[in-house]
Image (spheres, rainbow, N blue to C red):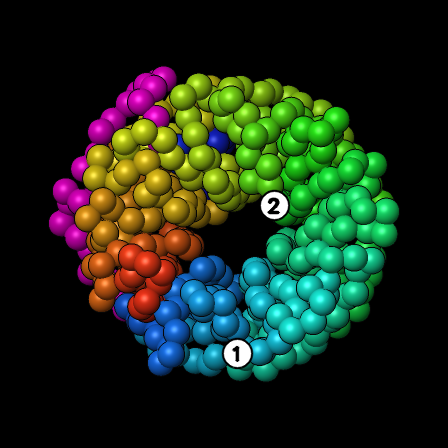
Amino acid sequence: MSLAASARSIVVGAICCAVAIGPFAFVDASAAAPARPRWLETFTRPTTPTSASALAVDASGRRVYVLMSDLHGGPSMIVAYSARTGEQLWRWSNRRMEINDIAADPSRARLYLTGGDRWGSGQLFLTSALDGRTGERIWRSRLDPPGPGSSNHVVVAPEGGQVYIAGSVRSDDAKVHWLVVAYGGSSGSRRWTGHLGRAYRYGFASDLSVTPDGVPVLAGTVDVQGDCHAAAGALAPSDGARSWFRVLGPTHDCGFEILAVGTTSVFVEWEDRDPTLASLDPSDGTVIWSHDLPRLRLVSTLVATPSVLVVEGGIRRHGTVAAFDSDDGTRAWSTELRRVDAYGIYALHAPPSGDAVYAAGSQRRGEAFVTALALGNGGRRGTTTYDGTWSYTQWVALAASRRRVYVAGGSIEGTNGLTEGEAATASYRAWA
């Protein structure tokens, strides 16, 4: 997020709490007159419930890519929409590949996807690049690691020249460690394979990001004397050598450590008795500051723009969005979304330019919502809701620019298993 030169950069987090540190505001998440979508498209399959699970926007802003997941475990699918009209442009799926993550190239019309093998032994890392304009596959890679594992994350270096995938692998000595692979974005040639956490009995790579200099950074779990500990590490982008690796502290939520990268820091969150938020030096992993967040729970996602950290989570009765100063971690403001329960915020995004942060999820009545808050003080800019076909509707993925907001999710039904499911994707005009 770009701020005025005189302003201090801040860390934005979505949390759920009753603690008021700094300015605190209460917001009725559906009180404002709802904005009408520029377009809204639904997607169904005739034999199985479906929901959107990830969203990416291409470099030109002309196309929106949505990962559609089969809620009964069938093959996933990519659907591309026109960002201007919502027209469906193409679909792509592979019956053998279970797609776990997607990422758009920041410099060209290209989409990268990674996942695992649905038919084989469960230890293949499958990665593909698609032409964003047509959906045709440009290249594919099949990596057979030394043991069972899964490729769960994909990110692209800022200039688009290198693509990183990451997952967890059990090696021949029964140890599980973090595996990272770098590919050439244009050719798909494998440039290197790197490892982190190999000295520990167990390790799980739970999140992957990349610094503005193109350095891949990971967060996850390692085993220390039988207990889970949060950890973070970085690899050299040239050859995959370990740059640094740091064990941060015990965690009871093994495998749910999350990170985000700002312009000058790497931010990591993990939960033991209380959630902990820490700022690390990206050059060597030195902890710059670390704060416990008392009475908070279930912080589950961090998303970063060059200078903003975005977190979502929940506790107690209401969802809350909070802003933190990135220099020292002190809270700047908190805004409570009063019609959203503690587990109701599923996505947050702060555009690379602009002065708003967007939260999306589901309200207590089962309607999906998007709320825009002022980055400077947490004041509400606007809210819109969407009530889908079935009883529970949610937005789970979100992307925004200065002019447009895109959300994806779905509407589901079923008490003893999911019996119905309809994916949905929408575009709204950004709240100024």
Q: Magenta includes 32?
A: yes
Which residue appears at 45% of the width and 74% of the height?
A: 79
The span shown in magenta is: 16-39
Residue that label 1 marks: 92
> Residue 206 in the image: x percent, y percent?
61, 45
Q: Magenta includes 261?
A: no
Which residue appears at 29% of the width and 57% of the height?
A: 415
Q: Main secondary structure of the magenta part?
A: loop
Left or right of 18? Residue 236 is right
| Labels 1 and 2 touching (C-beta < 8 A) | no
Residue that label 2 marks: 207
To which quarter of the image does residue 109 belong? Answer: bottom right
Left or right of 354? Residue 56 is right
- The kind of residue on which mark 1 rests is Trp
Which residue appears at 58% of the width and 20% of the height?
A: 290
Q: Secondary structure at mark 1?
A: strand
Q: Nearer the viewer, residue 312 or 356?
A: 312
The CA distance from mark 1 to mark 2 is 25 Å
Task: Using a 10 Å C-alpha cutoff, classify the residue at mark 2 as few (fewer than 14 neighbours), some (14 to 19) or many (20 or more).
Answer: many
Q: Secondary structure at mark 2?
A: strand
Left or right of 102? Residue 202 is right
> Residue 162 in the image: x percent, y percent?
72, 59
Q: Is residue 21 above or below residue 183?
A: above
> Residue 108 in the image: x percent, y percent?
59, 68
Which residue appears at 50% of the width and 26% of the height?
A: 275
**Which residue is the extreme one toward the front?**
416
> Residue 125 in the image: x percent, y percent?
71, 64
Q: Nearer the viewer, residue 172 or 260?
A: 172
